[in-house]
Image (cartoon, rainbow, N blue to C red):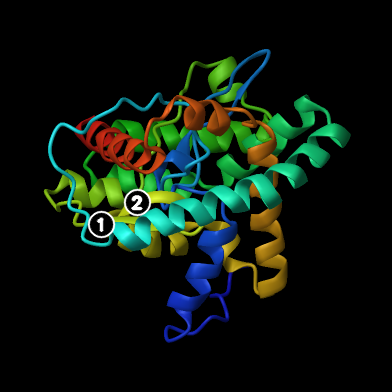
């Protein structure tokens, strides 16, 4: 797994789009960076840092953004929000429910920890780029402890025994840290709410993700799809609750996403 992916630069945008569809991922974003909360207790956060996951709803959305959101693609964005909604209810949720019925919660939580542990390079590099060496060092220490004592990351002794919590950061946050604006709002297939800055941030984070270096494309996509199904199985009901409480689902998701991202960047 040390060689570069077979995907050529010319094919990268198309290939990345496919990955976005299947990754669990940093939302287009950082919400892919939060850990599932189980019925028996919270897990420690991490992922992918590839963006904002519309179904990763650990953080409560609040109505109304503090400032107007640039949304020149509102027609497309509303349509894609509806498409994502159908994909969730018609495909992703049924598969995740079937998976949940077969695999015990403890095993699914362990799998989630394994995938988040793999994404240490994303968090480590972006903490360094934001000049947060202490947090970067904590991420490295977490990885070493969880990969060894935690058996490849299936356990999280770094948090449970040593109190080392994760510091999720992605390249979209790094750009925001240095003053790059969010640009216009953009809804991505499956990943949901994003913006131009965070979508572009997916590219460097892709190259920091160890799963990207699986040479066989079908295997890589299968791994990402499994990660997504596992993640969804731990969050069934969250999206449904949010949708029920939203007067206008699209603006609720859009404004909530932009608020959350601004807060994450400030931290």
Q: Which residue is mark 1?
A: 197
Q: Quadrant of the C terminus?
A: top left
The answer to which image quadrant residue 19 occupies is bottom right
Q: x%, y% of residue 47? A: 50, 42
Task: Find numbered disc 1 in the image and state the secondary structure of the residue it sits on.
Answer: helix
Label 2 CA crowd tier, 10 Å (few <14, some 14–19, many 20+): many
> Residue at image x 75%, y 44%?
94
* Residue found at the far right of this picture: 102
Q: x%, y% of residue 211? A: 60, 59
Q: Quadrant of the N terminus?
A: bottom right
Q: Which mark is residue 261?
A: none
**Mark 2 or mark 1, whichever is nearer to me:** 2
Looking at the image, residue 115 lies above or below residue 1? above
Q: x%, y% of residue 57? A: 48, 31
Q: Which residue is mark 2?
A: 194
Q: x%, y% of residue 44? A: 53, 25
| Nearer to us in this view, 115 or 135 | 115
């Amino acid at each position: 797994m040390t060689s570069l992916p077979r995907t050529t630069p010319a094919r990268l945008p198309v290939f990345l789009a496919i990955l976005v569809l299947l990754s669990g991922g940093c939302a287009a974003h950082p919400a892919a960076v939060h850990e599932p909360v189980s019925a028996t207790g919270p897990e420690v956060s991490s992922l992918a840092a590839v963006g904002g996951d519309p179904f990763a709803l650990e953080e409560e959305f609040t109505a109304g953004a503090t400032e107007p959101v640039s949304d020149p693609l509102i027609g497309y964005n509303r349509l894609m929000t509806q498409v994502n909604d159908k994909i969730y209810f018609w495909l992703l949720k049924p598969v995740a429910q079937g998976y949940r019925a077969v695999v015990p919660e403890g095993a699914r939580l362990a799998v989630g920890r394994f995938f988040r542990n793999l994404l240490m390079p994303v968090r480590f590099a972006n903490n360094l780029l934001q000049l947060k060496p202490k947090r970067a060092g904590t991420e490295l220490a977490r990885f070493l402890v969880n990969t060894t004592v935690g058996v490849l990351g299936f356990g999280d002794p770094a948090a449970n025994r040593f109190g080392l919590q994760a510091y999720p950061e992605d390249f979209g946050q790094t750009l925001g840290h240095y003053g790059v604006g969010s640009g216009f709002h953009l809804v991505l297939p499956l990943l949901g709410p994003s913006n131009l800055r965070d979508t572009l941030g997916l590219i460097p984070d892709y190259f920091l993700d160890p799963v990207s270096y699986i040479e066989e494309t079908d295997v890589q996509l299968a791994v990402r799809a499994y990660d997504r199904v596992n993640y969804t199985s731990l969050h069934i009901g969250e999206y449904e609750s949010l949708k029920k409480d939203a007067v206008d689902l699209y603006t609720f998701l859009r404004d909530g996403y932009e608020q959350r991202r601004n807060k994450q960047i400030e931290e």
